[in-house]
Image (cartoon, rainbow, N blue to C red):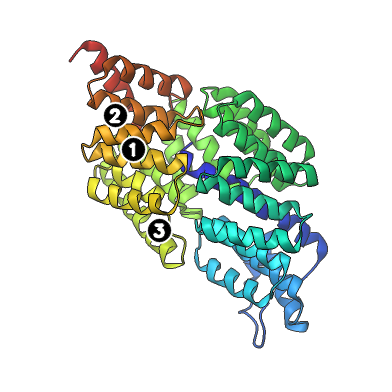
Amino acid sequence: MKYQQRQAVAVVLLVTAALAHLAASGPADSRAGGAPPVPAVAQQNRMHKVVHQLQQRLHAVPQDSSSWAQLGSSYVELARVTADPAYYAKAEGALKNAGDTGLAAIGMGTLANARHDFHAARDWALKAIAALPASAEAHGVLADALTQLGDDAGAQDAVQKMLDLKPNTASFARASFHFELHGDVDGARDAMQRALKASTTPEEIAFCRYRLGELAFDHNRLDEAAEHYEQGLAARGDDMTLTQGMAKVTAARGDVPVALESYRRLVARAPLPQYLQEYAELLEANGKTEEAAQQYAVLTEQQRLMESQGASDDLAAALVAADRGDGMQALRRAESEWSRRQSVFVADAMAWALHVNGRDAEALSYSDRAVALGWQNATFSYHRGMILAALGRVAEAQEALVQALRLNANFSPLQALKAGRKLAELRGGR
């Protein structure tokens, strides 16, 4: 799994859990005039049903601040499941109508995290905690933001507070991610098993199975990964992440035509940047360069659409540009993100962008920062190995590349091939 997507998983779970609460707590939209009617087909989708109920509630009781906050969070979730960033503006509007409440602050923080505005997310989370100090959800928003800002100690404290307040699926999932970032894979797996045990809805079960599948996939345990993905699909057969997980496993097992068809259907349904990139790389790795170029073009357009709705992601854009050899764009994007936050994720992007520009001595210093927490990440190791190779530190380069492939021989359909070729070149003394 591309590590960029890991940033968002805890945010996704928070919103999903919140929506489960919304569905149980009943209705709650727009003021005078209301929103356009929800199409009949869309109403069959649970998320659209929740939104429709909230809209009806607010049409009758427009001063209901709690329902406005719930509607805002629902729109954030719809942006995720539909890959339509236009929902972000709807979310912001609804949350502003919610007024100066703790629930509204939680929603604004969740929206800011989704848009990758992590400083704003942190500030909203702190505001929410001041209003609702016993809210585990508020501490979860803070944990997500601080993780992305590189405040490791602060993130750990927020996760612990969340566990103390409500040891449920959402808090155990964040604990799992924290363990994983620090290289404690067993601890991450145990925490996700506890999250699964605490799950009460099909959405939570599917989420936990996906994360357990990812932990297995990212450590070369394909059969175990497939089992988790399949069990998750048994709980929620239309889950996009689990569908993507199975497509990765299928590709890793060598059934490329089936994997490509799975990805084709997935991106038609949800053109998320991660899915588009994985699809494009799989096409390129298998010689389908023209089709890959089409998907890269769609990816560029989707990134533009996200940015037009305030959801900038210079980190992901930097990595895509670097992988495709566009050094100037990669470094511009990476430096822009680094100016806002200095997390291990962005340190790795800086390292890779500098490498593509031939500035490997500088790149290594950022790579050192990227691995500082101990995350066992194949992409990080691959980037580090290529940087070391460019510096002529052959033994260290080989060690890093071996580690990348030992961790996950399928970390990227395209970059894993390059890692193998570079390793053979170094071993051959060429």
User: Which label's residue is closer to the chain start, 3 or 2?
Assistant: 3
Identity, as a three-letter code, of the amino acid under mark 1: Ala
Q: Say which residue label 1 marks.
A: 351
- Check if mark 2's residue and mark 1's residue have beta carbons within 8 Å: yes
Q: Say which residue label 3 marks.
A: 302
Image side of residue 119 versus residue 313, left or right? right
Residue 385: x, y in percent? 33, 25
Numbered disc in front, either 1 or 3: 1
Assign a secondary structure to mark 1: helix
30 or 413, nearer to the observer = 30
Identity, as a three-letter code, of the amino acid under mark 3: Gln
Q: Say which residue label 2 marks.
A: 387
Q: Is residue 154 visible?
A: yes
Identity, as a three-letter code, of the amino acid under mark 2: Ile
User: Which label's residue is closer to the chain start, 2 or 1?
Assistant: 1
Residue 151: x, y in percent? 55, 44
